[in-house]
Structures are given as structure tokens and as C-alpha cells.
């Protein structure tokens, strides 16, 4: 069994899994950010949420495989300690550590999303907004440690990914900010009414 694992094209598997994970996480974030945008067809919210969840969970799972493959790789082998403990690997400890932290961050985001109904909304939102720094960690990890980052196509992929998420975030922020001088309506809850957000 060990001989079979050692004969696998692990270097290619690491590269493909890393890029696939990054693409799925980018797509999942893009859908999450634009979830309330008006251009989505009416009645598509349930499907959008499922696809958002699928991209996030699948991207995280493939990212974890990306890391696990490095342990059986013979070209630049990692130990389990170097893989699981941030900044402890012998090879590129900083960039490797950022990848480890991004994996832990995604697991935390997925876990708190599953526990959303048990958390107060502000608490859940804080954890969910960790998606932004986690994405940045994954971007830096892939760009500076990935062996394919010297390729124009891969650099373009990273650049377009960052531009897409930055553009969507800016559009959402603009959409949620009232225009100057526009009347603002505040809805007050009747005394004693329990908040829906717990």
C-alpha cells in the first residue's frame, strides 16, 4: 500500500488540488457576497445557497487533501507536525504556515455555519466575515509558494479572483449604503417583542 502511494503523481496532485481548492473557495465567496444582488433570478435563492455551500465545503475538502498529499510526496516531503502546526515546516515555513491557517480558518467558518441557529447573529457574522482574511491567507500561500505561480495564466487567475471579490464587495457595500440626503426609515420593535436574531 505504501509503495502504491509513493508511485502516485503526488506533485501534480498537490498542484491541481491547490488550484481547484482556490477556485472553488473563490466561487463560493463570490456567490455569498452577491447573494442579495438583484440580478439573480427570482426563486433561485435556495439553489444559490446550496451551490455556495457546496463550493465552500468542496473547496475546503480539496484544500485539506492538497495538504495531506504533501506528506506522501517524495519531492518536498512534509511531516504531519510541519503540516498541522503553522510555521513549523522545514520548507518555506511562513508561506506553508499561511496555508495551514487558511485550512483551519475554513473549518471554523464551516463549523460555525452549521451552528448558525445556535449562535446569535452578530457572533455568527463575525466568524463568517473571517472568510476575507482566510481568502487572503490562501491567496498569499498559493501565489508565493505555488510552483505554478510563475505561469502567466496562474497569475492571471489569482489577479482576476482578487479583482472579482473586491469588486463584488465594493458593489455590496455601495448597495447597503444609503445615498446622501436620502430619507432613512427606522422600524422600531414594540416593547417586549423578542428579536428574531436571538
Image: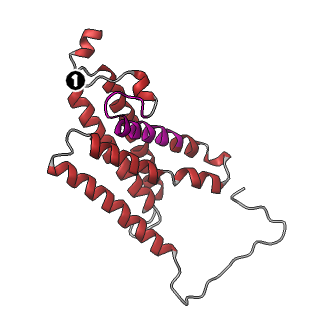
Magenta-drawn stretch contains 107: yes
Magenta-drawn stretch contains 183: no
Relative image position of residue 105 (x, y in whole percent): 48, 42
**Residue at the location (34% across, 24% down)?**
78
**Residue at the location (36% across, 26% down)?**
68
- Viewed as shown, does residue 144 lie left or right of 181? left
**Residue at the location (43% across, 53% down)?**
47
In the picture, which quadrant includes the N terminus? top left
- Viewer can see residue 41: no
Residue nearest the viewer, comparing 31 with 67: 67
**129 in relation to 185, above or below:** above
Relative image position of residue 139 (x, y in whole percent): 34, 48
- Tag 1's secondary structure? loop
Q: Which residue bears the numbered disc 1?
A: 75
Colouring of the image: secondary structure
Residue nearest the viewer, comparing 3 with 186: 3
Q: Which residue sits furthest right?
A: 192
**11 in relation to 110, above or below:** above
- Viewer can see residue 61: yes
The number of numbered badges drawn on the structure is: 1
Within the image, what quadrant is residue 99 found in?
A: top left
In the picture, which quadrant includes the C terminus? bottom right
**Residue at the location (26% across, 58% down)?**
160
Secondary structure mostly taken by the magenta-highlighted segment of the chain: helix
Write the start and end of the magenta stretch as one range.
87-108
Disc 1 crowd, CA 10 A, few/some/many (<14, 14-19, 20+): few
Q: Which residue sits furthest bottom?
A: 181
Residue nearest the viewer, comparing 148 with 43: 148
Amino acid at each position: 500500500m505504501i509503495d502504491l502511494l509513493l508511485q502516485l503523481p503526488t506533485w501534480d496532485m498537490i498542484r491541481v488540488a491547490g488550484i481547484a481548492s482556490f477556485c472553488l473557495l473563490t466561487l463560493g465567496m463570490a456567490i455569498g457576497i452577491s447573494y442579495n444582488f438583484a440580478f439573480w433570478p427570482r426563486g433561485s435563492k435556495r439553489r444559490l445557497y446550496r451551490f455556495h455551500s457546496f463550493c465552500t465545503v468542496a473547496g475546503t475538502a480539496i484544500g485539506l487533501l492538497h495538504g495531506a498529499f504533501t506528506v506522501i510526496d517524495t519531492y518536498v516531503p512534509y511531516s504531519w507536525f510541519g503540516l498541522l502546526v503553522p510555521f513549523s515546516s522545514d520548507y518555506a515555513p511562513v508561506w506553508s504556515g499561511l496555508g495551514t491557517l487558511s485550512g483551519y480558518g475554513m473549518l471554523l467558518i464551516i463549523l460555525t455555519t452549521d451552528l448558525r441557529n445556535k449562535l446569535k447573529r452578530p457572533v455568527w457574522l463575525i466568524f463568517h466575515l473571517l472568510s476575507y482574511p482566510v481568502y487572503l491567507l490562501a491567496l498569499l500561500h498559493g501565489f508565493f509558494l505555488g510552483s505554478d505561480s510563475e505561469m502567466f495564466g496562474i497569475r492571471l487567475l489569482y489577479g482576476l479572483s482578487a479583482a472579482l471579490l473586491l469588486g463584488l464587495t465594493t458593489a455590496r457595500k455601495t448597495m447597503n449604503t444609503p445615498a446622501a440626503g436620502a430619507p432613512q426609515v427606522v422600524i422600531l420593535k414594540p416593547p417586549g417583542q423578542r428579536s428574531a436574531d436571538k
